[in-house]
Image: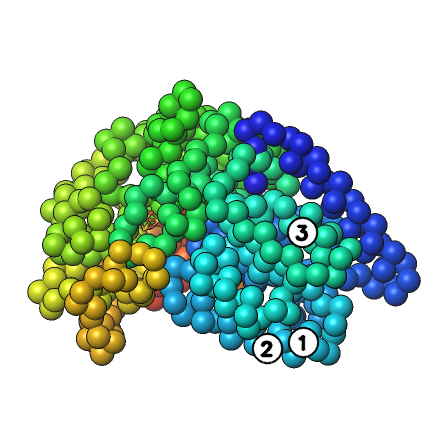
Amino acid sequence: METNADNSILDIQNLNIEKIKKWNDEYYNNKGKRRKFYCLTMGCQMNAHDSEKIIGMLSRMGYDKTESEQDADFIIYNTCCVRENAEEKVFGKLGVLKHLKKSNPELIIALCGCMMQEDFVIEKIKKSYRYTDIIFGTFNFHKLPELLLSRIETGSQIMDIWKEHGEIAEDTDYIREFPYRASVNIMYGCNNFCTYCIVPYVRGRERSREKSDIINEVKKLVSDGVKEITLLGQNVNSYGKNLKEPVSFAQLLREVNKIDGLERIRFMTSHPKDLSDELIYAMRDCEKVCNYLHLPFQSGSSRILEKMNRRYTKEKYLSLIEKIRKEIPDIMISTDIIVGFPQETDEDFEETLDVVRKAGFSTAFTFIYSKRIGTPAAVMEGQVDDKTAHRRFDRLLEVLNDGIRRVQEPKIGKVYDVLVEKISSQEGTVSGRSTDNTLIHFNGGKELIGTTVPVKILENKTFYLIGERI
Ligand code: SF4
């Protein structure tokens, strides 16, 4: 949560947190066990980071975390609406929760996140899922303590959906998934209106946080032991344009790079149309900025890119990649690709394959176009049938995977510094990432977690590498 100014928002919520904590402490004193919460996060890194904040608030309220819905006294789904199947999953799971609620009437069910900003979803919840207790959206999740307290006190369903963002409320009080790695929001919302995308409608227009607030947050994280930070925004390349004193993303990177004790800086997501030379030079010059870039291209057909309102062409994208590689030769680039966008022909799809072959991606997130109500693409003529979209998708994966394997192959025999994240599923091994964001498994134990270890690469498994400590 953010505020540029209004601390009273947080004061009120802190008061509510205290009241709920008291309620939970009384329960603990009577029953000898704590109430538990279960949090399901769907969608992108922004949602994952919002969930870290939600988990932070619930922990302060005296709840314990559980991984089992059956065990939970409070269940919260932080939803995503970028794809239809994610929405269907939520409605499917809500059906199951109805039975849980019957067997445990004290259970409180909360829904939040992007899906809740869609009118048809709210209508459906009102009609068919009346047993849900708290419903709120993307602009007011800092109000969770107030909404929960209100539900506890009244027993009624609480629905609080804002159509626009309010004050940005600063708050670094969240529980990180990894102690040495953290995400930091630098901006919210998006102004781009790609014709397939629902995000600008559910997350609002672009708002950047003040540079000083971001720097202070990163410094605090570093003093807590964080070594790697990821700067988050829907389109980080347009960071700072709307601030009273405009700052470019490149300038922000250079400032963050100066922070003592910080080892790695990552960021996402970048829009190709806004990726400036200034940013490429900052990435090249700042030793803490990782040699990795996520640069979605979506389609290789300039005709389809125009229909998507992406505001670049195939040629422009490829020349951008070339320029980046010239300045940062060892950079790894990943991307997002959509197949089956309305009116996409086999020729258009071949252009997409052509970009994949030429660009040399280290990994990619691939999607079959999903129609989102309220977006211009949803009502375009020439929607591509499922069979064609799936055929193209399978072909895309073949070409992509072959390309990824080739990109990773030259790493065999080389040594990479790996920041160890966790124990991996195979006994006696740990996994982590190199600065170029490649997942690497190697021999080691849990004492290595959070440390940076030099690892020699032995085997290329396409989506990850296997190595040994040297
Ligand atoms: S840049 Fe386009 S795809 Fe990305 S969030 Fe904005 S509208 Fe959606």
Between 124 and 20, the one lying in front of the other is: 124
Q: Which residue is mark 2?
A: 96
> Which of the 4 image quadrants contains residue 311?
top left
Between 17 and 152, the one lying in front of the other is: 152
Q: Which residue is mark 1?
A: 100
- Say the numbered circle drawn on residue 345: none
- Comparing labels 3 and 2, the label whose residue is closer to the camera: 3
Q: Determine if the C-beta at disc 3 is less than 8 A from ligand 1.
A: no
As drawn, 58 above or below 338: above
Give the amino acid at mark 3. Leu
The reply to whether discs 1 and 3 touch (Cβ–Cβ < 8 Å) is no
Q: Is residue 418 visible?
A: no
Q: Which residue is mark 3?
A: 147
Give the amino acid at mark 1. Leu
Residue at the image point whose x is 70% and y is 35% from the top? 11
Please state if 203 lies on the left or on the right of 462 as rendered.
right
Q: Quadrant of the N terminus?
A: top right
Q: Secondary structure at mark 1?
A: helix
Residue at the left extreme?
Answer: 347
Which of disc 3 and disc 1 is earlier in sequence? 1
Mark 3 neighbour density, 10 Å: few (under 14) some (14–19) many (20 or more): many
The reply to whether discs 1 and 2 touch (Cβ–Cβ < 8 Å) is yes
Expressed as whole percent of the image width and height from the top left, the position of residue 75 reads: 64, 64
